[in-house]
Amino acid sequence: MPYRFGNIFQVGFFLGGGKNMEQPLEQPLRELASLLIQRESKIVFAESCTGGLISATLARFPGISFVHCGSAVVYRLDTKIQWLGIPAKMLIDPGPVSEAVARAMAEGVLGRTPEAAIGVSITGHLGPDAPPELDGQIFVGIALRGETCHVVGHRLPTGASTTAPTGDSGLTEREQRQWGAVEFVFQQLIALLRGETIAH
């Protein structure tokens, strides 16, 4: 029997820790979680540059285990090959930060998670010491079971301003970009679940 959530959205302390303090990405987190739960759409992630932050952020929502299957943190190239079946030659050309690898990651993690309906991947170069042409570049893959995989490229700006974590000005640019990447993924998933056109 599906888990029922009652008036969960009316209980503010669940995500605020009992304080009047907004948590990182609280609004998009609530919106994405509610859309997934309403549609009973199970989701799984394959994360490279965010290192599990997307999954960890979504896991803050109480009861999300009903639809959140988990995340494969495939940070290194060999892990992408061994865990998701990414062809080694693809990681050389066009390389790990590419549309092709994002698509293969999303399809790979979905194929290895039979209960999931949505597979989401992210790969990118968030610095420091990124090649200029890839600095801040991310690719997000969204694979829907039985449908075409969507891949979205996005360039996170230098000194990216994000909503995470509230009031903390001590984040490195890399940390800001990681939170910016999480926010971007949430935005794309919300748009897709609403039936809107996602960014390309």
Image: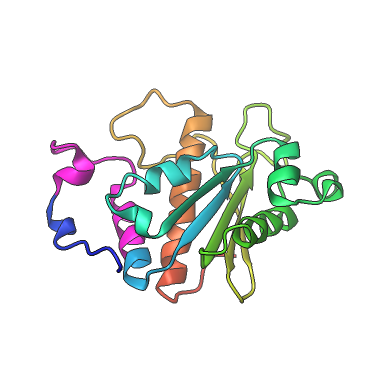
Q: Tell me what residue is drawn at x 37 percent, y 72 percent.
A: 39
Picture coordinates of residue 181 (x, y %)?
A: 50, 46
In the rendered image, residue 25 lying in the magenta stretch gets the answer yes
In the rendered image, residue 145 lying in the magenta stretch gets the answer no
Q: Tell me what residue is drawn at x 41 percent, y 64 percent.
A: 190
Give the colour scheme of this rendering: rainbow
Q: Tell me what residue is drawn at x 44 percent, y 76 percent.
A: 195
Q: Tell me what residue is drawn at x 34 percent, y 34 percent.
A: 165
Residue 119 shown left or right of residue 32 in the figure: right
Quadrant of res 107: bottom right
Q: Which residues are magenta?
A: 12-34
Q: Nearer the viewer, residue 69 or 49?
A: 69
Residue farthest toward the front in the current orientation of the protein: 1
Q: Nearer the viewer, residue 99 or 41?
A: 41
Residue farthest toward the top in the current orientation of the protein: 170
Picture coordinates of residue 122 (x, y %)?
A: 59, 49
Picture coordinates of residue 65 (x, y %)?
A: 36, 53
